[in-house]
Image (cartoon, grey):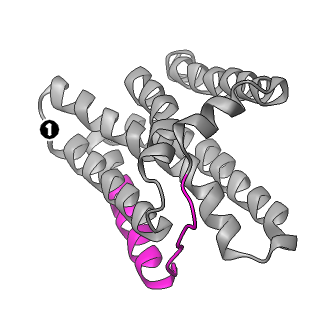
Amino acid sequence: MTSTSILAAIAGPILTIAIGRLDRRVVVLGLSLLLIVSNVLSMITTHFFVLVIARIILGLSVGGFWAVAMTAQAKLVPQEKVAKAISIVLGGFGIGTVISVPFASYMAAYFDLRSVFMVGCILAIAVFIIQLILLPRIPMEQGVRGKDFLELLKMKNVITVFVIAILIVGGQFAAYTHITPFSSK
């Protein structure tokens, strides 16, 4: 959990800068493939080190997807619908997190962990296929530069939002790591 969340937090800004003007469809599909690779490695490994690598790959995928999804969805809808699209994307992140982690814990209690990763892999493949079929090209006129990102970090409101997000998401995932031990008693 720790390696995944730390990499997700680091991957978002770095990936946003690194991908430049690359078509966001290609990026989203690549991040979805990383999710599949992570689940396959997690499902088949018998070594803890490989599992940690798989979870690091998951962190890269999730962090990148969180960062890229906002700009990608803004290009898919008319300007007057961007706020609604952002709400839908963020709602999807929230619903996915609230459902997936407890469901995975429930499955792990009644099946083995490989089954949990297999279900995750099947769902990731299904989403990848849907994206491949339905997601149009999402060209970008310009990418985010490191300088742009550093300018954001100078804004008090942006720092406030970052701190709130870190506390909420960090608290949420920290709580998940303690739910199972208490629920089994």
Q: Amino acid at mark 1?
A: Thr
Residue indicated by mark 1: 45
Q: Residue at x 53, y 46 (%)?
A: 100
- Tell which residue pokes out farthest to the front in this image: 147
Q: Is residue 82 depicted above or below 133 in this figure?
A: above
Q: Residue at x 34, y 63 (%)?
A: 122
Classify residue 28 as left or right of residue 122. Answer: right
Q: Residue at x 22, y 45 (%)?
A: 43
- Quarter of the image containing the N terminus? top left
Camera-side residue: 53 or 110? 53
Q: Is residue 82 magenta?
A: no
Total marks drawn? 1
Camera-side residue: 27 or 180? 27
Q: Is residue 161 depicted above or below 86 in this figure?
A: above
What segment carries the magenta color? 119-143
Asked where in the image residue 138 lies, by quadrant, the reply is bottom right
- Tell which residue pokes out farthest to the right in this image: 80
Q: Is residue 135 magenta?
A: yes
